[in-house]
Amino acid sequence: RAYLVGAQPQADMAALNTALLALVASLQPGAEEVARQQVAFEAVRRVLSQGWPQAQVHLFGSTANGLSICNNNDIDICLELPDGSDSLSSKGEVVEQMAKLVEEAGMKDVLPLPKARVPVVKFVVGETGTKVDVTVNNILAIVNTKLLRDYGAIDQRLLQLCFVVKHWAKRRQVNDSYRGTLSSYCYVLMCIHLLQQRAPPILPCLHALKPSTHRRTVGVWQCDYHDEVSSLEDFGAQNTETLAELVWAFFEYWAWKHDYNNSVISVRTASFLTKAQKEWTRRVGNERHLVCIEDPFELTHDLGRTVDRQTSGVLHKEFERAACILRDCADPLEKLFEPY
Ligand code: ATP
Ligand code: MG
């Protein structure tokens, strides 16, 4: 498993690219599935609007940022209340009230989790079988969903790479932040960061581009960035790397090039920060900072903090496995995505 400086994949990269693009196409949800999610969202919106006529109901997560993989039956919804319900306890109360309301409206398997770090009510929309998570005033998630969607509109290679990486992470069972691996959100940020680092870059740094056309303050966090992405569609045109080359670059980086001891990847600055700069050098409680990914808005939030000693070993091994398969196999795809 040793790293060979400058090693290149065995496979015919043009053929590998064609196969990866076909895989991406097959992972895209069909029109029927998209319509079903929309029906489920409208059903939930109707119920919540009866309980809170002043509130807004938002869809966020992968169904809203264009990164949903087919057969994903989950949707993320946020109830945005006008004001005054920002404390954790009142969010918990709203979650309890929502649970009652959706139960009365005939939703199945209703499970309120009012004491969770992010209070949530989970249930299933009977007509469509869609699993729903509803959170309250989860405004940062709405904003970071938009940021991901905006980056995705700049260069289609980002969406393609995210599909491949998410599919790989689900197959290899390293896509579960509750079990110490990384969330889909985290993998997408890793992909954005990689494309910001290519030479020439494929993606810009939307936080750094002026003027900041998206302006919003959420609690103590200023969430400003440049969101006029339609004028950036040619940004990555100077870079002609293919999806296959970027998939290789992703796994090579996380297998052998990332400095796990010192480095923090930061999409906000399109650069690397140090753990010392972020004061992420010591374990505090359960936060170990073994794999460090800065949230682009909530700057004290290390998205890799759920990773512990054991799961960081698992992750690192999986990155190495993927990189070795890409390097050594003439026809790597089946093995790369082999279920764990
Ligand atoms: P999947 O298709 O696997 O469900 P997803 O894009 O919906 O992927 P999730 O990890 O399910 O991603 O998260 C849903 C949304 O919740 C993200 O798009 C993001 O807005 C928000 N989110 C998730 N984890 C975090 C986190 N640790 N910090 C901030 N926001 C988060
Ligand atoms: Mg989701």
Image: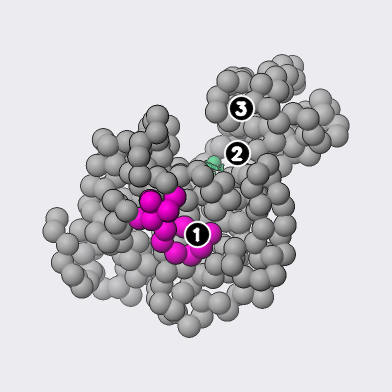
Mark 2 surroundings: few (<14), some (14-19) or many (≥20) residues within 10 A: many
Q: Mark 2 points at which residue?
A: 75
Image quadrant of residue 81? top right
Sequence order check, earlier mark of 1 and 3: 3
Disc 1, SS = loop
Decide if residue 6 is in sight here.
Answer: yes
Q: Mark 1 points at which residue?
A: 267
Labels 2, 3: front one: 3
- Amino acid marked by disc 2: Ile
Residue drawn at x 68%, y 41% as measured from the top left = 219
Tell me the distance, in whole angstroms, between the alpha carbons under discs 1 and 3: 28 Å
Residue drawn at x 66%, y 71% as measured from the top left = 210
Residue drawn at x 26%, y 48% as measured from the top left = 316
Say if the magenta span includes residue 251. no
Q: Name the residue under label 3.
A: 120
Say if the magenta span includes residue 271. yes
Decide: is 3 above or below 125: below
Q: Find the magenta span and give its range.
A: 263-278
